[in-house]
């Protein structure tokens, strides 16, 4: 008996990855992420699982983005006490990410409750830093390409997924069958990381389809797009607010800006990275260049500039007071701040204080899930709520997908055709993306393709 139960990032969701593999010897949870989107709906999904955590034997983590690890402290609150298997790099980064997630939740809840004190509206963080630290003793680091046995009769290995630093796809072998969980997989052509590994002789593929219905812009055009935006805002003395994931995306943006400054394609403009964990993440980047497969441009530039992530001139904001001072600072300047989908953290304060001025630009550089603030702004909303308070939108909203660390439609197709699985389960994509990619697979001879609903279970 082998069963798969889909408990998140299904039914058209792109967040909250949670999938259970069950054999006669136990249950394995693949990823344990939080959902993002409508507050009440996401809160309900995050606090309640479609399974009993105490009956799980272990968790295996693909990578350290919060929509893949962010519910681990809640899992322990609900009775889970098993091992958590992950790569060494994901172990190191996940500890930073989870502590930062807890801090942001507590800060956001305190601010929300303060401004809504008189109307009785109250929210509570999912967990705090003490809850997070209780999880760390259960982390079990495993090298890539080395098989381990999380439960009897099941062999597992990590292979490179090319999505973010440390990210891996998960190969599961049991009862003579091979299951591949892609996790989030990277693009064939990207700025920094190695392209994804291919696993052969796969029976069942669980595949992310974030961009299953569209392609990315050509990454070779990124410098011109960014320089045009910066030069315009600099001339008008505005601000550029860049909501960005602290892992991977921030480092890539700084690298591009660093090149533009070095080759004098943009003026000297103050840059503030407003996220306490960004220095730690960037330090990990600088000390793990063996994980990179630089583009030819990056290889040459890295030899020329030993500080490609801008330590010489980027201001890394650490304290809340320092962050608040940026709200009263006159432009031009750039702020890069989490979260990438504008769902929490200091970036909400920067948006709130910049949204009413048409000189300013909100530059979206990552995927914006349905029902998030970032998605509403990207779709052209003229009025949005931030911390429950309505705001008219006057600043310009620009969106670039050059930086996406997700495979586009053709990359996904090439990935599947090289693997040649017998059955494919499409997850981590909105329904238009999943339906479109299912049609594409059918056209290319892959006929057994399934679109799991939330809570749906399949016997393999």
Image: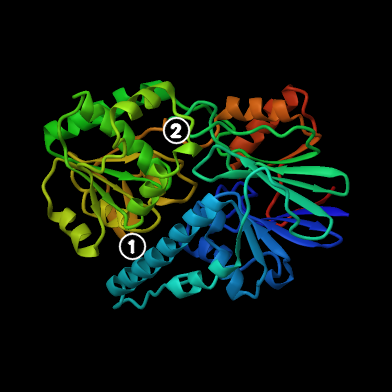
Q: Where in the figure is residue 216, as x and y percent of width and height? A: 48, 28
At 52% from the left and 26% from the top, the residue drawn is 215
Q: Where in the figure is residue 326, as x and y percent of width and height? A: 17, 54
At 59% from the left and 33% from the top, the residue drawn is 196
> Which quadrant would the N terminus be assigned to in this image?
bottom right
Q: Is residue 135 above or below residue 300?
A: below
Q: Is residue 246 left or right of residue 316?
A: right
294 or 167: nearer the viewer = 294
Residue to which mark 2 is pinned: 192
How many residues crowd mark 1 within 10 Å: few (<14), some (14–19), many (20+)?
some
Residue 268, located in which quarter of the rendered image?
A: top left
Earlier residue among tags 2 and 1: 2
Q: Is residue 123 left or right of residue 333?
A: right
At 12% from the left and 38% from the top, the residue drawn is 237
Closer to viewer: mark 2 or mark 1 = 2
| Residue 131 is at least partly visible in this image | yes
Q: Where in the figure is residue 160, as x and y percent of width and height? A: 60, 39
Q: Secondary structure at mark 2?
A: loop
Q: Is residue 248 above or below residue 129?
A: above
Q: Secondary structure at mark 1?
A: loop
Q: Where in the figure is residue 158, as x and y percent of width and height? A: 66, 45
Residue to which mark 1 is pinned: 387
Residue 183, located in which quarter of the rendered image?
A: top right
| Residue 36 is at least partly visible in this image | no
């Amino acid at each position: 008996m082998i069963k798969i139960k889909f408990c998140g990032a299904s039914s058209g969701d792109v967040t909250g990855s949670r999938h259970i593999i069950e054999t006669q010897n136990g249950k394995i949870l693949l990823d344990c992420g939080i959902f993002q989107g409508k507050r009440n709906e996401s809160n309900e999904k995050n606090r309640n699982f479609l399974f009993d955590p105490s009956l799980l034997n272990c968790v295996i983590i693909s990578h350290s983005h919060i929509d893949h690890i962010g519910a681990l402290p809640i899992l322990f609150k609900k009775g889970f006490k098993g091992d958590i298997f992950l790569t060494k790099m994901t172990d190191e980064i996940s500890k930073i990410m989870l502590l930062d997630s807890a801090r942001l939740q507590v800060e956001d809840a305190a601010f929300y409750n303060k401004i809504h004190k008189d109307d009785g509206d109250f929210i509570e963080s999912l967990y705090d830093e003490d809850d997070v630290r209780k999880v760390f003793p259960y982390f079990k680091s495993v090298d890539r390409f080395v098989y381990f046995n999380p439960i009897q009769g099941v062999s597992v290995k990590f292979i490179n997924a090319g999505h973010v630093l440390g990210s891996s796809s998960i190969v599961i072998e049991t009862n003579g069958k091979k299951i591949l969980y892609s996790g989030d997989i990277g693009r064939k052509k990207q700025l920094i990381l190695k392209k994804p590994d291919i696993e052969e002789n796969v029976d069942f593929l669980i595949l992310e389809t974030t961009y299953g219905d569209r392609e990315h812009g050509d990454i070779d055009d990124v410098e011109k797009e960014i320089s045009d935006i910066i030069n315009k805002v600099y001339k008008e003395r505005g601000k550029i607010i860049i909501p960005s994931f602290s892992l991977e995306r921030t480092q890539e943006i700084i690298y591009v800006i660093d090149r533009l400054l070095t080759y004098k394609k943009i003026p000297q403009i103050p840059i503030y990275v407003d996220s306490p964990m960004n220095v730690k993440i960037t330090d990990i980047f600088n000390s793990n260049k063996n994980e990179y497969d630089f583009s030819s441009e990056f290889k040459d530039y890295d030899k020329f500039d030993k500080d490609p992530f801008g330590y010489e001139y980027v201001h890394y904001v650490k304290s809340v007071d320092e962050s608040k001072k940026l709200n009263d600072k006159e432009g031009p300047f750039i702020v890069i701040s989490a979260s990438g989908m504008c769902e929490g953290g200091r970036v909400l304060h920067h948006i709130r204080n910049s949204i009413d001025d048409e000189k300013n630009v909100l530059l979206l550089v990552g995927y914006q899930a349905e029902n998030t603030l970032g998605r509403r702004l990207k779709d052209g909303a003229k009025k949005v709520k931030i911390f429950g308070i309505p705001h008219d939108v006057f600043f310009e909203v620009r969106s670039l997908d050059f930086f996406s660390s997700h495979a586009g439609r053709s990359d996904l197709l090439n990935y599947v055709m090289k693997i040649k699985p017998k059955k494919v389960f499409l997850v981590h994509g909105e329904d238009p993306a999943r339906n479109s990619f299912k049609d594409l697979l059918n056209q290319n001879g892959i006929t057994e393709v399934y679109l799991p609903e939330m809570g749906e279970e399949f016997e393999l």
